[in-house]
Amino acid sequence: MNRETYIAIGRRVLTREADALSMLADGLDDSFARAVELILGASGRVIVSGMGKSGHVARKIAATFASTGTPAHFVHPAEASHGDLGMLTKGDVCLVLSNSGETPELADIIAHTRRFSIPLIGVAGRAESTLLRQSDVALLLPAAEEACPMGLAPTTSTTMTLALGDALAVALMEHRHFTPENFRAFHPGGKLGARLSKVADLMHTGADLPLVASGTPMADALLTMSQKSFGVVGVVDATGHLSGIVTDGDLRRHMDGLLERRVDEVMTANPLTAGPDDLAEKALGVMNGRKITCLFVVGADGRPQGILHIHDCLRAGIA
């Protein structure tokens, strides 16, 4: 095969799966809404299960639910038959995936939900399958061709199941008014957590703040600037409000007789600042845009609460 053939195969697969997703979207009906309501009404967790490729998809769906405000766990059907059925309790909802709906390893989970009246949502590609007939809510996948040329390897079917899980998760999170703050609480690490970090999470406070009072001689201000190692010093007025900052640029512009001056003569008045509740990513954008390395963090009362250095953002993984 040549490269053009590989590209043609790739396009054929993606087109087939995209068409299947359109069929799935067009076919959503009241069963989808009832599945969402069943999960919303549960006092416990969503237990997601599936075997083989459906099991891999089930793990991802459970992870997506859990990270978007719907407590969920994956239970392997084979392990369920050897003790993990105890993880399914009253108050839970069980979401079971199987393209055929006849996967034998799922029998014990299905029977357990029926025995203990645990609500069961089934996802399968056959309307008359055991799984969908036993389910309280049956989500039927459309009859779309697998992308595999032999029609055997789960490809299109697993893509549809994964997308259906995403649709359920998003419907649930939107109903719950899930916010970026909620999302960050579940994603404190990695790139997602970093992007949602607030300035208050990264700023330096207390004794680390390079601050001097209005009227301070520049000799003393330079000493504070050197000790705090931020390359700037903030100037506060008699009421404690931030009235200006002295930067390296200010020092260069006032080199003539610098040590005989006071901070008020050298400082840049009304400097750019950030709020403690601002996203650190936004503050980083301001620093990059203005080619500065620090922002003082000022509260609603106009008093400085901290200082954020560009290196703090980079160390946190914000870039």
Image: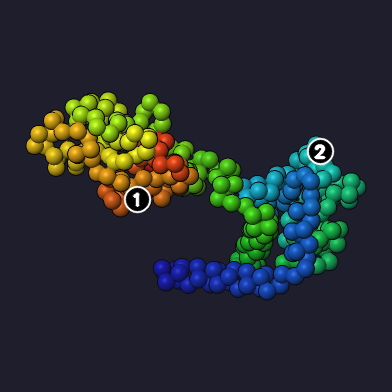
Q: Residue at x 28, y 51 (%)?
A: 290
Q: What secondary structure is found at the residue carrying circle 2?
A: helix
Q: Which residue is mark 1?
A: 286
Left or right placement of residue 229 versus residue 83 in this view? left
Q: Residue at x 19, y 42 (%)?
A: 249
Tag 2: amino acid = Gly
Q: Where residue 115 sits: x, y (%)?
A: 91, 47
- 143 shown above or below 270: below
Tag 1: amino acid = Val
C-alpha distance separating marks 1 and 2: 53 Å
Can residue 68 be seen here? yes
Q: How many marks?
A: 2
Q: Where residue 259 sits: x, y (%)?
A: 14, 30
Q: What secondary structure is found at the residue carrying circle 1?
A: helix
**Closer to the camera, 262 or 309?**
262
Q: What numbered label is drawn on residue 86?
A: 2
* Structural crowding at the residue carrying mark 2, measured as other residues with C-alpha within 10 Å and reported as few (<14), some (14–19) or many (≥20): few
- 267 shown above or below 50: above
* Structural crowding at the residue carrying mark 1, measured as other residues with C-alpha within 10 Å and reported as few (<14), some (14–19) or many (≥20): some
Q: Quadrant of residue 204?
A: top left
Q: Where residue 231 sits: x, y (%)?
A: 25, 35
- 258 shown above or below 142: above
Q: Quadrant of residue 208?
A: top left
**Closer to the camera, 249 or 136?**
249
Mark toward the start of the polypeptide (1 vs 2): 2
